[in-house]
């Protein structure tokens, strides 16, 4: 079946976004040109400008498009059962997924890219945080409030507890990655951080 003009346009649009993501992460925002993106996407520079009027608009789409990835994490966070016998097991399972998802090389690269350009695009960094990680924290706070209502946790400030939980898990691997230019952890490290983080959290809040 012959591809429609609309289908070709959508395919080129996605090719441009995919190429731009790769180039921005490799060269940073200042070092990326529309020529670089057009070459990798296998389209003309005119085609890139037809879909995106300038590099800034393309950068914004690349950054904000990644926030849809949090949906699966939000579903997972919201689905923790209120069962005392399996609380540590369930939180540890969540911690493993949390760490595995948020320490993926591309996620860490994107985080570094956004931080590097936060002075230039402060509203974009804020939007990425609000639509992504902040939504996960808000859902986790709601979950902790529910667990506290069932008598499984002692929590006065659920959102602060959500930040404590994520901080216990992410502080080491994320900071190492930010300063070393990439992941420094092994899967064994992540497993250890998950178990130790949950135990420390429950020591404070159970």
Image: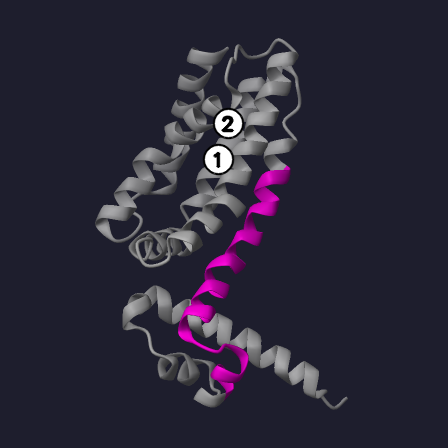
Q: Which mark is residue 96?
A: 1
Dominant SS of magenta comes to helix
Residue density around tag 2, few if under 14, some if 14–19, many if 20 or more, within 10 Å: many
Residue at image mark 2 = 92
- Report the colour scheme: one colour
User: Which of the 4 image quarters holds residue 186?
Assistant: top left
- Which residue shows up at 49% across the image and 42% down it? 133
Please state the extent of the stretch shown in magenta in the rendering: 47-75
Residue 55 on the magenta span? yes
Disc 2 to disc 1, C-alpha distance: 6 Å
Determine whether 146 is above or below 41 in the image.
above
Dots 2, 1 in contact, CB < 8 A? yes
- Which residue shows up at 44% across the image and 44% down it? 102
* Residue 1 visible to an observer of this rendering: yes
Q: Nearer the viewer, residue 97 or 163?
A: 163
- What is the x, y in percent for residue 112? 32, 53
């Amino acid at each position: 079946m012959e591809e429609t003009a609309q289908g070709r346009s959508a395919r080129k649009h996605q090719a441009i976004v995919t190429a731009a993501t790769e180039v921005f992460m490799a060269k940073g925002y200042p070092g990326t040109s529309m020529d670089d993106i057009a070459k990798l996407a296998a389209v003309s520079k005119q085609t890139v400008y037809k879909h995106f009027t300038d590099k800034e608009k393309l950068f914004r789409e690349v950054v904000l498009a990644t926030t849809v990835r949090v949906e699966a994490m939000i579903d997972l966070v919201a689905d923790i059962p209120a069962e005392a016998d399996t609380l540590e097991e369930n939180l540890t399972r969540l911690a493993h997924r949390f760490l595995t998802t948020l320490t993926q090389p591309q996620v860490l690269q994107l985080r570094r890219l956004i931080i590097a350009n936060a002075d230039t695009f402060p509203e974009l960094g804020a939007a990425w945080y609000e639509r992504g990680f902040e939504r996960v924290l808000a859902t986790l706070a709601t979950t902790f409030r529910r667990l506290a209502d069932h008598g499984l946790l002692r929590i006065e400030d659920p959102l602060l507890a959500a930040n404590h939980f994520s901080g216990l898990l992410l502080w080491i691997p994320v900071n190492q990655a930010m300063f070393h230019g990439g992941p420094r952890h092994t899967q064994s490290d992540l497993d250890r951080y998950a178990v130790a983080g949950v135990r420390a959290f429950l020591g404070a809040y159970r």
